[in-house]
Structure formats: C-alpha cells, structure tokens
Amino acid sequence: MRELTQDCVVFHTNSVLKRDSANRRAQLSKWIRKFHSECGTLTSDVKEAIDKLNDSSCIVIMTAHQPNLFAYGGVMRKATLGYALSRILSKELGLPVISFFGIADQDFANDRWLRSALLPDVQKRDGILELRYDINQKLMLTNIPKPSVKTVDNWKNEIRRWLLSKINSVKRLGKELNIEIDINEMNLISNSDGFLGLINECYDKSRNYPDFNAFLMSRIINEVWGYDTLFSRFSECQQIFEEEFKLLISNFREYSTYVREATDSNEVKVDQGVSELEYQLLPFWYHCECGSKVRLTPEFADNSLSGVGECDNCKREYLIKLLLNEGCGLSNIISKISARALAMPLVFFLGLGVCCYIGGAGGQSYLRQAKHVADHMNILFPPIAVWRPRDRYHGISQVEALLIYQKISGNYDSSLYTQTVEKIKKEIYEIRKETKEIESRRQEFISPHLDRDAKSDKISEIINVKKYGPNRDDRLPNLLINERLLENISHTLTLYPCIIDYAINTSLQNTSKQWIGFLTEDGTLNSDLYLETNIRTSLPLNYTVS
C-alpha cells in the first residue's frame, strides 16, 4: 500500500494543473445520486462523498466492473481497496478523496460470470455448485429483465440446502475421523438468512437484471460495510463524455495507429488484451434498437468520417455519420454509444481526472494496451492497482474437502496431493489391466479348440492372476469415487468463490473488517490473506493442491 500511495501522490502532484474536470464531475454526481436514490443507499456518507466530488480539489479513485451475479470476492474487494486508499490519500495530501465504482451495464450478456455464481462443493460435479441464470447473450445487460420470483426462490433454496448439507457432512466426517471441529452453526445459518434478506430487498427495488446485481453490491458496500463508495451506471453516465469521445474520433487515424502498435508490438503485446484487429474499429459501440450492439468500422470520404456496421443480434446494417465538413455529429448519438474496452479508461481518465484506477486480474492486459495509446496521445494515465490475493479460510465447504482428503490419503499434507492422485490412478490401472488379462484368458478358456488339459491349465492361470489381491475387482468402484473426489478437492480448495461464501462463513461485516485491517497494516497487494470464520479447527489453511 505504501508504494501505491506514493505513486498516487506523485501522479496527483504532476497532473493537478493539467486537468479540467469540474464540469464532468458535476454531471457525474447527478447520475450517482440517481443510482443511490433508486438503490436505497443514499446514506449520509454517500451524500457527503457526492459533495466532495463537486469540490475542485477532490481526488478521484476509480474502479469498474460488470454487475455479475452474486459477484465473487475479487469484485467486492475492489471497493475495499478504493475505500482504504481514499482514506490514506486524504490523510497524506489533506484533500478530499472519493472512490467511484462504475457499473458496466452496457456490456453484452455473454460473460460467464454475469449469469453464473460459484460456491465450493466437493460433492458436486467438478467440486463446484453453480447458480445460473439463462439469458440472451447477444443483448446488452440493460435489456435483460430481472429474474422471475421462482428463479430467485430456487437460488435461495439451493443456498440453504447447500449450507445444511455441508454442516451435516462436516459433523459426520469429524466424528468419523475423530477430529475436533467447532462449528458455530447458529452464526452460519444467521449469516445465510441475512444475505437472503438482502437478495429480497434488492430484487424488490431493481427494474432489470443488472440493477438487481448492482444494487446488491451497493447494499453490501454502502450499507453493510458503511463505505462512501459512489456508484453509477455506465448506461447513464457515459453520455457526459461527449468531448472525450470527440477527441478520439477527431484524431481517429492517430488513435488507430497507436492501438495497432499496442496490440502488435512485442513491447506491449499481451495475450488477453483486445484483438489485434481492434485498430480497425471505432472506439465505441453503437446501440441497436433491438437491444444489442454494433461494431463500427471507419469509412472515410473527403473530410468526412462515418461508422459502418451490422448488429450482432438482428443483423440490421448501420451507417452513422460522425465527422462532416461542418463539424462532429456525435451529439446526435451520444446517448446511444458506449466505449469499447480499450477506449473506456481513456475517456473516463481524461474526463474525470482520475488519480488511480483499481483494475482486476483479467483487465491488466487491455489496460497496458490503453496506457500505450494514452502515452502517445498525451492523455494522462494514472497508476493502476490490482488486488487479487487468495483468501484462505476455513469455510464449511473447504473444511469438508480437507476432511475428505484426509480420509482418502491418511494425512493432511497437501504437498503429497499429487502422489496420492498418482497412487490411486496406478491402482485403478493395475486392476483394469488384471481384469482385462483375466477376460482374455477366459475367452481362451471357452475356445472350442482347447482340449480338456489345456482348459485345466487356463483355469490355473486365471486363479493365479486373481491371487494378486483379494477382491480387487470390488475395490474399483471406491477407487474411482476417490479419484473423482480428489479432483473435486483441488477445484474446491482453489476456487475463487462468490461473495455468498464469505457472507456465510465469515459474515459480510467481518470480511470487510479483515480486508481493511490487512490493508491498513500495509499488507502487500499480492500476499495471501488468512481470514477468521465461524469454524474452529486444527486443519491446515496453507494447502497447495493443484
């Protein structure tokens, strides 16, 4: 945190005279107030933060994410890092600092985590319980209706069944293995009921699917955790950045050149960034009337620039005039466009004068590409922070997985995990090999070409093969089950779970308290965290199964 804080101080000092973002921030504050009013999280702290945003000396920390279904811990900890950093920077510089969280609700609904939330469960396929919502992946999120009451009730019932099943399993395994495990069952169930209550409240207030998820995030962050983080929907606030979009369009040839360099150069090329063909596209999507989006390619004619494209969903073709002899025609469509991934930070950083951006592990690649473009176009690009450690804690499912590992392997040493897997695979292979060998001899035994003495010899061979181990065939089903469980154990213990797992095992309040405590003690952003839960046991936490 010290290094990040210092980077932000240096960036602010060097850029404070180069930005003029007061007008854009004032416009943004209106959309922020609208979101929190509709969500029910316009707390006194949020109101105070909105006032700070309108102060010309205010420093802005920004993050953004899609409104995922029951977002995983990494999404939520972005807000925690923003909150902690804002407090440290404010104290360091003696200036107001706010943390802004943009909800990317104009994305396509095709990302898995938008419609899927994962909980660890060693008994399920691949060691994971998946909560799903089937949606039209070709539409923008804003056009996805919120789930039916039946769907939400099914999710809540699955969560309840999962919790009770895990509690009973851990109790049984602990008794069977004579291991002392203190489960605060009442707290686990109370935490679960509290989270399900939040789901109900957010469902009642939401008007569509992204709102349902974004409202849940805000209720946790602003209400339960008490942060003054400011939320706004991209679908509403991006239209305030007309001048920033105009800059990219008016200098499109230059922009395109640097995008091509960023995606093609060996110095900045990355594996998970935007496509190498990104330079051929305009920096924003156009929103089709059907609820989907259109990729626009540039079409130049004399001194004019138009965008041409076909809707991904309905296949309608568009010709959008952007630059004409008399000026830019962006004003007519500003409410119908949204920035592409690489252009988003350029637009927001320039418009709001952002001092630090908190990204995710998956976004580091395109952010490096965006920085290349920004540096060459003289657009200020702030320090980027990523906080994605592994939280290690004794959750109810993690404890169950460790107990099953001990039952199968006879020890708790996770460093022996690979050896245990290989041992079981070898036993399975040998049994199958012997079974095949016996079957081969049996086929020879029933051959009509063998005389009585030869058949007697074959019977002796079959008996000798079976001597390799008593009832070896009977062991195969259990070995196959253990092989599957060992694979599931790896998935269960290495999963980055959704926020439900934290809410139940640690409680939402204590999750924030422990995350904040780690950061304020100057914990490094890539160190593992060891969290306290409602389960006490001597089982190891530093497992390394893979």
Image: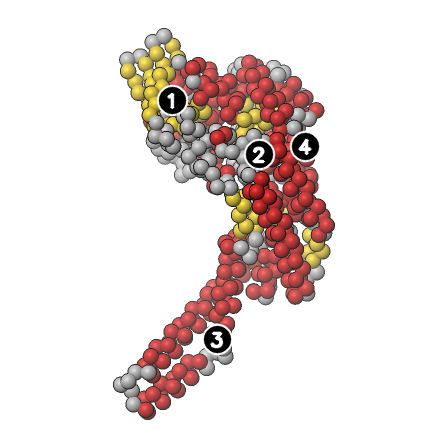
Gap between marks 4 and 3, in whole Å? 59 Å
Pick the front one: 533 or 202? 202
Within 10 angstroms of label 3, few (less than 14), some, or many (20 or more) residues?
Answer: some
**Residue drawn at (29%, 87%) of the image:** 450
The numbered disc on residue 212 is: 2
Residue at 63% in and 59% down: 169
Q: Amino acid at mark 4?
A: Glu
Q: Which residue is mark 4?
A: 223
Residue type, label 1:
Tyr
Do the residues bearing badges 1 and 3 touch, measured as CB atoms within 8 Å?
no
Describe the element under mark 1 as helix, strand or loop.
helix
Q: Position of residue 178 (x, y in %)?
A: 68, 65
Q: Badge 2: few (under 14), some or many (20 or more) residues near its Cα, within 10 Å?
A: many
Label 3 to label 2, Cα distance in Å?
A: 54 Å
Q: Is residue 385 above or below residue 446?
A: above
**Which residue carries the number 3 mark?**
472
